[in-house]
Image: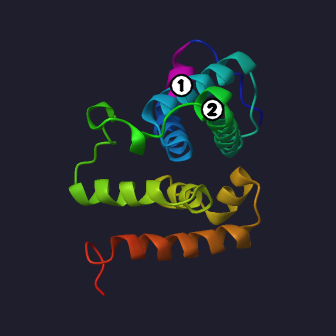
Amino acid sequence: MEEQPLRADGSFDAVIQRYQSMVFGLALAKTGSRSDADDVFQEVFLALFRAGKTFRDEEHRKAWLLRTTLNLSRRVTASSWRQRTVPLDQAPAGELPDPPLFRDPRESRVWEALESLPEDYRLPLYLFYFQELSTGEIAHALSLGPGAVRMRLSRGRDRLRDLLKGEMFDG
């Protein structure tokens, strides 16, 4: 059964409610910037609204949102404007943006460690643990094989463990 295209009524709001944390979180993991993630978030849902697409099912919609978020995030990170900006670690101390807020300080520390990983490990870990996607779904979203995703998850967990050793992990 084919789903109806999105309309400017409650159905679009329901889609935003359902996928907002996934889209924003993936954009944040990809761009490393809350303001860039906000921009990507808006562009993704604007593209969804404008496309008037029909989807076979919710998994098709979710895959479309993941792919669109990655593509738009990639466009932001590759822009010539962004390449001319000063990295945050070189910005004056009072001008750094606030990190994402979590209820538990340990979650904030895990997020900081996750952000410090290379994108090849950061994105699969984020999608697996924060969005609870399967390795198959991650492979599809990132255009990788399932084996490559499992390898990146394993290596990324090892790197996270090393970064957090002594804080959350014993020995």
* 164 sits left or right of 49 in the view: left
Which quarter of the figure has residue 139?
bottom right
Colour setup of the view: rainbow
Mark 1 lies on residue: 39
Q: Amino acid at mark 1?
A: Asp
Q: Secondary structure at mark 2?
A: helix
* Residues drawn in magenta: 9-16
Q: Nearer the viewer, residue 31 or 91?
A: 91
- The quadrant the C terminus occupies is bottom left
- Mark 2 nearby-residue class (10 Å; few <14, some 14–19, many ≥20): many
Question: Is 10 covered by the magenta stretch?
Answer: yes
Residue in the image at 51% along x and 31% along y: 36
Task: Check the image and report above or below for 156 versus 141.
Answer: below
Q: Main secondary structure of the magenta part?
A: helix
Residue type, numbered disc 2? Val
Q: Residue furthest bottom?
A: 171
Query: Label 1 vs label 2: CA separation?
Result: 9 Å
Q: Position of residue 74 (x, y in %)?
A: 67, 39
Q: Is residue 138 above or below residue 165?
A: above
Q: Secondary structure at mark 1?
A: helix
Residue 153 image position (x, y, % from top left): 57, 70
| Residue 56 in the figure: left or right of residue 89 | right
Q: Quadrant of residue 34?
A: top left
Counting residues from the N terminus, which is met first, the one under dot 1 or under dot 2?
1
The image shows residue 132, relative to residue 74, as above or below, that is below
- Return the residue at label 2: 76
CB contact under 8 Å: marks 1 and 2: yes
Assess whether residue 15 is covered by the magenta stretch.
Answer: yes
Looking at the rendered image, the quarter that the N terminus falls into is top right
- Which residue corresponds to the image point at 28% horizontal and 43% vertical from the top-left? 101
Left of 22 or right of it: where is 89? Answer: left
